[in-house]
Amino acid sequence: MFRSFGAPELVVVGVLVMLLFGGSWLAKAGRLAGEKVKQLVLRAKWLWASATGSEEEALEKERAFGQELAREVMSEYPAPVAEVKQALVERIGARLSAQRKAPWPFSFRVVSAPVANAFALPGGFVFVYEPLLDMLGADDDALAFVLAHEMAHVLLGHAREAQLRRLLLGRITARAGGVGQIAERLLTLAYSREDELEADREAVSIIKSAGFNTAGAAAFFSRSAGVESSVLEYLSTHPPAKERLKAVQAQASAT
């Protein structure tokens, strides 16, 4: 049997580990912890300003929080992408941005990652994973719908609502244990469905006003249908593609 170690012995073991393996891992751990704390502080300032401050203060804090998250995304996926791909996303993004007044300029970045995905961070930072861009090929209308959908989340304030929801549900989970976790899952899905459908509607409006073909939305869902679910992460937390397709087709016909 192994005997338990006391506090002095644990200190000695810790020192030996540092001598054997170096202190670089400790520095890295400290840096990562510092980044997480910084994100939590920026998020808290943003939500507090949204609840108690002026609109200008809330927007300033939102931009700062999103900028910190964007920096982390870029550091996580440092591999370069082809300039032509980045230029394509920026060109379409700029054309879409001109159709909606936003408190800060949107930025559009392509990152190299193993899955097909796209998302928008608070403050107007939109990211597209390279596999999703490759899946869409040369279909500018479909790409415009994806970018407009992510822009819509920011313009409609979904990010702030999601953060507030996480804080609320976090307390439910802490108090209710397993029941809280189930409630968190169900409520997150319910809100997600509503937000995604609303973002789809706004996206159709944006791409139409920007001169893109609204059929790009249907083209996107059609292309997504043939992609393995393990690769296409983009639709994993969204409402069923058929439901979204039917909704955007109805809106496109109405407009």
Image (cartoon, rainbow, N blue to C red):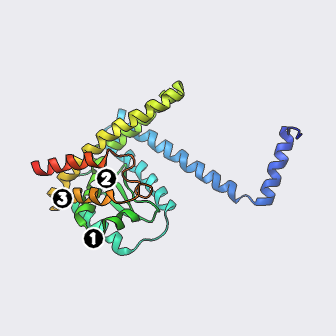
Q: How many marks?
A: 3
Q: Callout 1: few (<14), some (14-19), or many (20+) C-alpha neighbours within 10 Å? A: few
Percent position of residue 240, x then y: 31, 46
Does dot 2 land on a helix, a strand or a loop?
helix
Question: In this image, 158 relative to 218: left or right?
Answer: right
Instruction: Name the amino acid type tagged 2.
Output: Glu
Q: Secondary structure at mark 3?
A: helix
| Screen quadrant of the N terminus | top right
**Label 2 crowding class (10 Å Cα cut-off): few <14, some 14-19, many 20+?**
many
Q: Nearer the viewer, mark 2 or mark 1?
A: 1
Q: Which residue is mark 2?
A: 150
**Helix, strand or loop for disc 1:** loop
N-terminal of the pair, mark 2 or mark 1, is: 1
The x and y percentages for residue 121 are: 38, 51
Residue 142 appears in the rendering? yes
Q: CA distance from mark 2 to mark 1?
A: 19 Å
Quadrant of the image occupied by residue 148: bottom left
Tag 1 residue: 138
In this view of the protein, can residue 55 be seen by the observer? no
Badge 3 amino acid: Ala
Say which of 226 and 159 sits in front. Answer: 226
Outermost residue on the left side: it is 254
Q: In the image shown, does 235 or 51 lie closer to the viewer?
A: 235
Q: From mark 3 to mark 1, how far is it between C-alphas?
A: 14 Å
Residue at 47% in and 31% down: 182
**What residue do we see at 64% from left, 51% from top?**
30
Q: Nearer the viewer, residue 108 or 30?
A: 108
Identify the residue position indicated by label 3 in the image.
215
Give residue 153's position: percent from left, percent from top. 30, 47
- Closer to us: mark 3 or mark 2? 3
